[in-house]
């Protein structure tokens, strides 16, 4: 029976993958051909979705983007045996976009059946947990520390140090919380992993639990991700049934349970203390730090909080050793980062590469330039709170320190490309507007500052006392940076000030022309 | 009007949801999601019922309901159209898509059509940023949506309704 892989990933579904699957099923039945359809995750070549793969003796052969109307011609071309077709790309692994990547965290995503424990283990899954079960908590934490892994959610805090704090804390109950509130525009790696290889996240969290002595885990997933929520819940059920979760995991005497919690449309809940409040059933109001969550987190107990990709990197580190992971990357940015190419880009998708690759390589070599075909003008890296990077800085290597030294941030590796039609004054205004909409309201610089920010930028756009208002804007931004309780208010000035700094001409256009737009 | 909120059918169902969640206050958000799924919204009248069941004040429950964008106080239309307005989609002309959607549905963001068929909402990121602009219709995600694809999707959605 020929295996046909059709992604069930939300991005693939958004381009009609379900219709393609139905068409392939009915065409095969009509032709009396026996096929087995597997709904895998996405390979990350999102510009080719729905990407249909067929298993052949020569390996998996890729076709895409496939529409339901192409299905009959695919059968005519004998695609089940890897036949030639205008949508064909040859062996999937040989596609340049994929071949040039360094897939560690996403090694299995798109390859396996996301809900098959057997498939997962056959592709190296649970090797990390096996190693971890033979080690003490301190040894596991040392491996994670030595690997150089830093928080993949954006802040880049060393994961091992966080874990050690929780390990050393004494409490009757500790927790492991996964922040899967991936609300930043330009990011979708968390979603892709949860839909394409959920067991990796489960394994990473289980290892965190065993390492730090936490027996309860929660995954906070945003409500905008219904597919990811469903997959994670199903995967947890499978893992429990196979005794990889619950009491006495694999006969080790160790316990770890996991539940999924759904967010409710508040961007701020991606901030870790706000997420904790939300997990406790409250308004997502940011908590002051200290105390840090590692000591007083969920319900006041010591809590490991990491992003999806931080946890997902851990199984590999345990299975292959800290050195293996550390050998990737540059400077103090070790390992790989799954970059997400988004926005106005021809070949959008997920590119996992070691730190050190430049922005230009990502956008040009992988991304193939803009979707519109016009020149790229600005790239926003690291989400709505990240800087707008001008063309002159496209050759910066992706490295936490290099970006910070240039007034930008790598963040979670989300890359949103804008072509030369972008109006940076409008983008700056949006950054303030978004902050005003999503602020939790606890601290004044963020709650009021964002509203005033919109007003000031409106005056600049309207041509009212521009020079004076630019000074006011700068002052306001400084107040938000210095006085905000969390990154929402503290980093909103990043996109605003980078826009003013790198694209001053956009703040100096004739007000009349703008009004006519 | 004299009926106590907990004696109403809505109140009854809200109380059931709470008890299925062990009347635990930390599960309030899950409870509200479930209540909204069953009743189409979180009506003002069930707030005291929930508060009593999970031993919180009405103010606390009201605070949570109003903090999160997901919870509504009145039911949405039969179809909910969410268009992404975040940066990635902006770079692919989502503002033009928004204008088209508003004009063709004759609705502003946050509004429901008079016949109760469609609610139009703005969202900030659906996680489909490599295939911007994105929108979600009744929980189904769509990518690379331009004006003509929007019209196709809406025609399909609304024709399902009449069947």
Image (cartoon, helix red, strand yellow):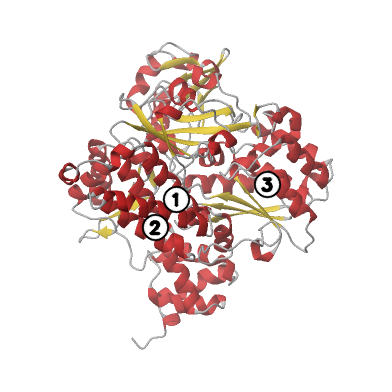
| Lower sequence index among marks 2 and 3 | 3
Of residue A208 and residue A184, the one placed in the foreground of this image is: A184
Estimate the x, y position of residue A366 in percent, counting from the top left.
47, 22
SS state under label 1: loop
Q: Residues within 10 Å of mark 2 (few under 14, many from 20)?
A: many
A360 lies left or right of A206: left
**Dot 1 falls on which chain?**
A
Q: Which residue is mark 2?
A: A450
What x and y, as percent, mark residue B97?
Answer: 26, 42
Q: Above or below — where is B112 with respect to B14?
A: above
In the rendered image, residues at marks 2 and 3 fall on the same chain: yes
Q: Earlier in the sequence, mark 2 or mark 1?
A: 2
Mark 2 near mark 3, Cβ–Cβ under 8 Å? no
Decide if residue A299 is in sight here: yes
Q: Is residue B142 visible?
A: no
Q: Residue at x 29, y 43 (%)?
A: A507
Query: CA–CA distance between discs 2 and 1?
Result: 8 Å
Q: Secondary structure at mark 3?
A: helix
The answer to whether B111 appears left or right of A120 in the picture is left
Q: Earlier in the sequence, mark 3 or mark 1?
A: 3
- Rendering coords of residue B156 (x, y %): 26, 42
Residue at 29% across / 58% down in the picture?
B110
Q: CA distance from mark 2 to mark 3?
A: 36 Å
Residue A13 percent coordinates (x, y): 41, 37
Q: Nearer the viewer, residue B136 or A112?
A: B136
Q: Which disc, if any, is residue A492?
A: 1
Asked if the residues shown at circle 2 and circle 1 are in contact, with their CB atoms under 8 angstroms apart, the answer is yes
Task: Tell me the residue that label 3 is attached to.
Answer: A205
Q: Are marks 3 and 1 on the same chain?
A: yes
Label 1, residues with CA under 10 Å away: few <14, some 14-19, many ≥20: many
> Is mark 3 in CB contact (under 8 Å) with mark 1?
no
A347 on left or right of A246 = left
């Amino acid at each position: 029976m020929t295996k046909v892989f059709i992604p069930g990933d939300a991005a693939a579904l958004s381009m009609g993958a379900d219709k393609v699957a139905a068409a392939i099923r009915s065409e095969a039945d009509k032709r009396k051909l026996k096929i087995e359809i597997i709904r895998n995750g996405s390979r990350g070549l999102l510009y080719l979705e729905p990407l249909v793969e067929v298993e052949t003796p020569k390996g998996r052969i890729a076709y895409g983007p496939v529409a339901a109307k192409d299905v009959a011609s695919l059968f005519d071309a004998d695609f089940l045996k890897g036949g030639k077709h205008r949508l064909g790309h040859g062996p999937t692994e040989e596609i340049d976009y994929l071949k040039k990547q360094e897939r560690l965290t996403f090694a299995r995503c798109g390859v396996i059946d996301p809900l098959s424990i057997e498939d997962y283990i056959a592709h190296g899954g649970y090797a990390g947990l096996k190693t971890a079960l033979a080690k003490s908590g301190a040894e596991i934490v040392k491996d994670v520390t030595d690997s150089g892994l830093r928080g993949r959610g954006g802040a880049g805090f060393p994961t091992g140090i966080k874990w050690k704090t929780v390990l050393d804390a004494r409490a009757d109950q500790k927790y492991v919380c996964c922040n899967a509130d991936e609300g930043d525009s330009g990011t979708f790696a968390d979603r892709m992993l949860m839909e394409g290889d959920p067991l990796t996240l489960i394994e990473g969290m289980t290892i965190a639990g065993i390492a730090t002595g936490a027996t309860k885990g929660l995954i906070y997933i945003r409500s905008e991700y219904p597919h990811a929520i469903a997959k994670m819940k199903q995967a947890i059920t499978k893992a429990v049934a196979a005794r990889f979760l619950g009491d006495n995991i694999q006969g080790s005497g160790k316990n770890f349970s996991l539940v999924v919690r759904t967010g409710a449309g508040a961007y701020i809940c991606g901030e870790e203390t706000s997420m904790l409040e939300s997990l406790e059933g409250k308004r997502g109001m940011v908590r002051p730090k200290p105390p840090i969550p590692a000591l007083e987190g969920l319900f006041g107990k010591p809590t490991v909080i990491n992003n999806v990709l931080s946890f997902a990197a851990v199984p590999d580190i345990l299975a292959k050793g800290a050195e293996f992971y550390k050998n990737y990357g540059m400077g103090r940015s070790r390992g790989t980062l799954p970059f997400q190419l988004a926005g106005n880009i021809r070949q959008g998708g997920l590119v996992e590469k070691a730190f050190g690759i430049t922005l230009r390589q990502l956008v040009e070599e992988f991304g193939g330039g803009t979707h519109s075909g016009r020149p790229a003008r600005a790239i926003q890296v690291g989400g709505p709170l990240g800087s707008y990077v001008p063309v002159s800085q496209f050759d910066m290597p992706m490295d936490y320190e290099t970006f910070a030294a240039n007034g930008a941030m790598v963040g979670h590796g989300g890359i949103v490309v804008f072509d030369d039609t972008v109006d940076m004054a409008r983008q700056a205004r949006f950054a303030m507007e978004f902050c005003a909409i999503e602020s939790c309201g606890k601290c004044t610089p963020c709650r009021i500052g964002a509203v005033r920010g919109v007003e000031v930028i409106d005056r600049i756009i309207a041509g009212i006392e521009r020079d004076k208002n630019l000074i006011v804007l700068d002052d306001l931004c400084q107040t938000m940076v210095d006085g905000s309780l969390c990154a929402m208010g503290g980093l909103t000035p990043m996109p605003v000030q980078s826009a003013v700094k790198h694209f001053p001409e956009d703040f100096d256009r004739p007000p009349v022309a703008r009004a006519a737009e | 009007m004299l009926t106590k909120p907990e004696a109403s059918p809505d109140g009854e169902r809200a109380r059931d949801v709470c008890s299925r969640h062990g009347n635990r206050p930390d599960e309030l958000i899950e409870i509200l999601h479930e209540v909204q799924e069953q009743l189409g919204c979180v009506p003002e009248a069930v707030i005291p019922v929930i508060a009593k069941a999970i031993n919180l004040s009405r103010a606390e429950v009201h605070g949570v309901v109003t903090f999160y964008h997901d919870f509504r106080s009145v039911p949405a239309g039969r179809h909910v159209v969410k268009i992404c307005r975040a940066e990635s989609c902006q770079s692919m002309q989502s503002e033009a898509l928004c204008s088209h959607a508003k004009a063709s549905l004759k609705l502003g963001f946050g509004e429901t059509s008079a016949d109760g068929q469609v609610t139009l909402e703005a969202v900030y990121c659906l996680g489909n940023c490599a295939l911007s602009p994105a929108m979600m219709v009744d929980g189904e995600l769509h990518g690379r949506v331009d004006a003509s694809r929007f019209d196709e999707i809406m025609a399909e959605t609304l024709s399902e309704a009449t069947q």
